[in-house]
C-alpha cells in the first residue's frame, strides 16, 4: 500500500514559510508530537537561550539573534541551503522590525 503524504507527515521546508518563526513553531510542534517529552526547556538548552525567550520567539513576539539562528539551523539539522534561508529570513525580519511600524520607504508614517 503506498504511503499517502498528508500535512502532518510532509517534510517541512523553510522555503515554504514567509516568517521563520512560523516554521520554527511548526517544527517544534512536530517534534513534540513525535516525542511528548520534547519541551521548550529542552530546545532552549540546545540553543543556550532562556526558556521564556524561546517561547516568545516561537509565538512570534521575539526574534532570534544571528548567532542563535546558526545554532537553530544546527539543532534542526538543516542542509546548507535551508540553513542559509533561515539565517537570511532572521536577518531580514529583524531589520524590518527595527524599522518600526511607522517607517515606510517613500512615505510618511501612518
Image (cartoon, grey):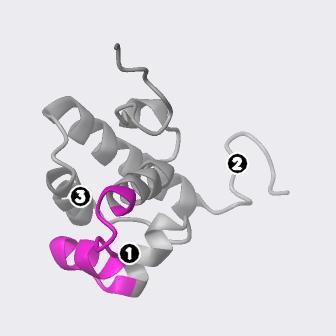
Q: Residue 10, image x and y in percent?
A: 40, 31
Query: In the image, 98: left or right of 46?
Result: right
Q: Nearer the viewer, mark 3 or mark 2?
A: 3
Q: Which mark is residue 72?
A: 3
Residue 50: quarter of image: bottom left
Q: Dot 1, crowdedness within 10 Å: few (<14), some or many (≥20)? A: many
Earlier in the chain: of badge 1 and badge 3, it is 1
- Whether residue 75 appears in magenta in the rendering, the answer is no
Query: What segment carries the magenta color?
Result: 32-51
- By secondary structure, the bulk of the magenta-drawn segment is best described as helix
Q: CA distance from mark 1 to mark 3?
A: 11 Å
Earlier in the chain: of badge 3 and badge 2, it is 3
Nearer to me, 22 or 63: 22
Query: In the image, 87: left or right of 102?
Result: left
Q: Which mark is residue 54?
A: 1
Q: Dot 2, crowdedness within 10 Å: few (<14), some or many (≥20)? A: few
The quarter of the image holding the N terminus is: top left
- For the residue labelled by badge 2, is the local secondary structure a helix, a strand or a loop? loop
Q: Residue at x 80, y 57 (%)?
A: 109
Q: CA distance from mark 3 to mark 2?
A: 30 Å
Q: Dot 3, crowdedness within 10 Å: few (<14), some or many (≥20)? A: many
Nearer to me, 8 or 107: 8
Q: Nearer the viewer, mark 2 or mark 1?
A: 1
Q: Residue 94, image x and y in percent?
A: 45, 58
- For the residue labelled by badge 3, is the local secondary structure a helix, a strand or a loop? helix
- Whether residue 33 appears in magenta in the rendering, the answer is yes
Q: Give the vertical position of 104 relative to 106 (above or below).
A: below
Q: Give the vertical position of 78 relative to 108 (above or below).
A: above
Amino acid at each position: 500500500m503506498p504511503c499517502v503524504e498528508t500535512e502532518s507527515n510532509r517534510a517541512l521546508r523553510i522555503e515554504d514559510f514567509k516568517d521563520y518563526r512560523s516554521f520554527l513553531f511548526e517544527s517544534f510542534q512536530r517534534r513534540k508530537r513525535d516525542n511528548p517529552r520534547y519541551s521548550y526547556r529542552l530546545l532552549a538548552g540546545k540553543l543556550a537561550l532562556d526558556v521564556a525567550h524561546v517561547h516568545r520567539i516561537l509565538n512570534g513576539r521575539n526574534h532570534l539573534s544571528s548567532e542563535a539562528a546558526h545554532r537553530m539551523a544546527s539543532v534542526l539539522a538543516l542542509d546548507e541551503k535551508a540553513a542559509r534561508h533561515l539565517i537570511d529570513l532572521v536577518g531580514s525580519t529583524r531589520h524590518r522590525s527595527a524599522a518600526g511600524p511607522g517607517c515606510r520607504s517613500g512615505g510618511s508614517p501612518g
